[in-house]
Amino acid sequence: MNWKDIIQNWPKTIALIVLTALLFWGHACQPEVRSLIYPSVKVTRPELQIELDSLIATAQYRMADLDQQEAFRDLIFQNALVVFETGTMNPAGIITLLLGLYGATRMVKDTKDRIVKKA
């Protein structure tokens, strides 16, 4: 192929160059949206899916933590009701209450330690 052929077929040559550029652009430039966690950063679809999975996992962890706290609160209220209804102190109830308080304080301390380590 020489310059004479290119000059005679200039529309095809330009179309081929433009098509090649569009193919490279279409393949290389993935669509991006703002991040869920850092709105100033743009992310692609796989990165957005990772962020979404992370947010869902965090929400599930926090819901489980709330469930655990509510179960502990219910246990304390049940033991308090038994004490007030019967007027006697149940040793098993007191031991359960003390162990529950110990477990709650350990849970809070462990959570605090994990947060401090991450920071």
Image (cartoon, grey):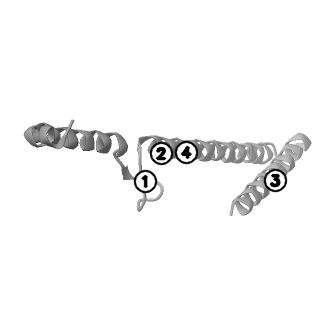
Q: CA distance from mark 1 to mark 4?
A: 12 Å
Residue under numbered circle 1:
35
Residue under numbered circle 3:
106
Mark 2 vs mark 4: which is more N-terminal?
A: 2
Q: Nearer the viewer, residue 48 or 30?
A: 30
Q: Amino acid at mark 3?
A: Arg
Disc 2 versus disc 4: nearer the observer: 2
Residue at the image point whose x is 46% and y is 59% from the top: 38
Task: Note whether residue 88 is visible.
Answer: no
Residue under numbered circle 2:
47
Residue at the image point whose x is 41% and y is 59% from the top: 39
Mark 1 vs mark 4: which is more N-terminal?
A: 1
Residue under numbered circle 4:
54
Q: Amino acid at mark 1?
A: Ser
Mark 2 vs mark 1: which is more N-terminal?
A: 1
Mark 3 vs mark 2: which is more N-terminal?
A: 2
